[in-house]
Amino acid sequence: MHYLDYNEKIDHGTPDFPIAFYHVDEHHSRYNMPFHWHKEMELIQILSGSLRLYLDDEEINAGAGDVILIGEGIIHGGVPEHLSLIHISEPTRLGMISYAVF
């Protein structure tokens, strides 16, 4: 795997407000999650359904109520099933985080 090939080149938010907020369900263009990484921290809350999430070499099965925090530079991707989630991306402020599930 060539790490740089998976760099997501999407600006999240604007320079004045660099936070992006998405509600993602099966009708959203970001429903399928191919492997990628970015310099922003990502927070995901699963509202319904499930997500098999791959974080570097780890596999996590997340379901309704789970909250996942993904740190900058972590290659991640997922397989959704009847999924609805809230996705927030913002510049990393906690540089020591790789990922956490709550």
Image (spheres, rainbow, N blue to C red):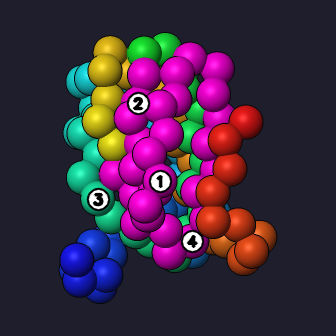
Residue 68 point in image, percent of width and height: 61, 42
Q: Residues within 10 Å of mark 4 (few under 14, many from 20)?
A: many
Residue 49: say if magenta. Answer: no
Residue 40 badge: none
Q: Residues within 10 Å of mark 3 (few under 14, many from 20)?
A: some
Upstream in sequence: badge 2 or badge 3: 3
Which residues make up the magenta segment? 50-77
Residue 75: say if magenta. Answer: yes
Q: Is residue 92 above or below residue 99?
A: below
Residue 35 badge: 3
Q: Could you tell me if the residues under marks 4 and 1 are in contact, i.e. CB atoms within 8 Å? A: no
Residue 94 point in image, percent of width and height: 77, 70
- Residue 24 visible in image: no
> Residue shown at 47%/31% (left/top)?
61
- Residue annotated with mark 4: 72
- Residue annotated with mark 1: 58
> Residue shown at 43%/64% (left/top)?
56
Could you say whether the residue bearing mark 4 is in a helix, strand or loop?
A: loop
Upstream in sequence: badge 2 or badge 4: 2
Could you say whether the residue bearing mark 1 is in a helix, strand or loop?
A: strand
Q: Nearer the viewer, mark 2 or mark 4?
A: 2
- Residue annotated with mark 2: 51
Q: Is residue 73 above or below residue 2?
A: above
- Residue 51, picture quadrant: top left
In terms of secondary structure, what is the magenta stretch mainly?
Answer: strand
Q: CA distance from mark 2 to mark 4?
A: 20 Å
Q: Quadrant of the C terminus?
A: top right
